[in-house]
């Protein structure tokens, strides 16, 4: 399941991204990345792959 891009309103032809507008999409995913940013410069990133 791919989480939606909340608040997406208008497609920009100059920015060719596969956004998931406003509702989740069921799709097979081979790799994911998650970023977490907090106050004070605390940052964390995790990348996972099924390969």
Image: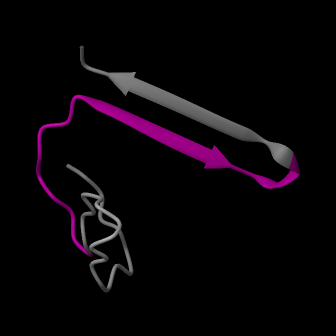
Name the residue furthest bottom: 9
Asked which quadrant contains residue 45, the reply is top right
User: Which residue shows up at 28% across the image and 61% down it?
Assistant: 16
Way the structure is coloured: one colour
User: Which residue shows up at 24% across the image and 64% down it?
Assistant: 20
Is residue 30 toward the left or the right of residue 8 in the image?
left
Name the residue furthest right: 40
User: Which residue shows up at 52% across the image and 30% down it?
Assistant: 46
Say if the magenta span includes residue 33: yes
Q: Start and end of the magenta stretch?
A: 22-40
Quadrant showing the C terminus: top left
Out of 5 and 14, give the one closest to the viewer.
14
Asked which quadrant contains residue 15, the reply is bottom left
Coordinates of residue 12 in the picture (x, y in percent)? 31, 76
Coordinates of residue 47 in the picture (x, y in percent)? 45, 28
Is residue 38 toward the left or the right of residue 35 in the image?
right
User: Which residue shows up at 27% across the image and 78% down it?
Assistant: 11
Coordinates of residue 9 in the picture (x, y in percent)? 32, 85
Name the residue furthest top: 51
Q: How many marks?
A: 0
Say if the magenta span includes residue 13: no
């Amino acid at each position: 399941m791919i989480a939606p891009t909340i608040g997406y309103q208008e497609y920009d032809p100059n920015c060719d991204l596969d956004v998931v507008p406003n509702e989740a999409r069921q799709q097979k995913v081979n790799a994911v990345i998650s970023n977490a940013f907090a106050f004070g410069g605390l940052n964390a990133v995790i990348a996972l792959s099924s390969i």
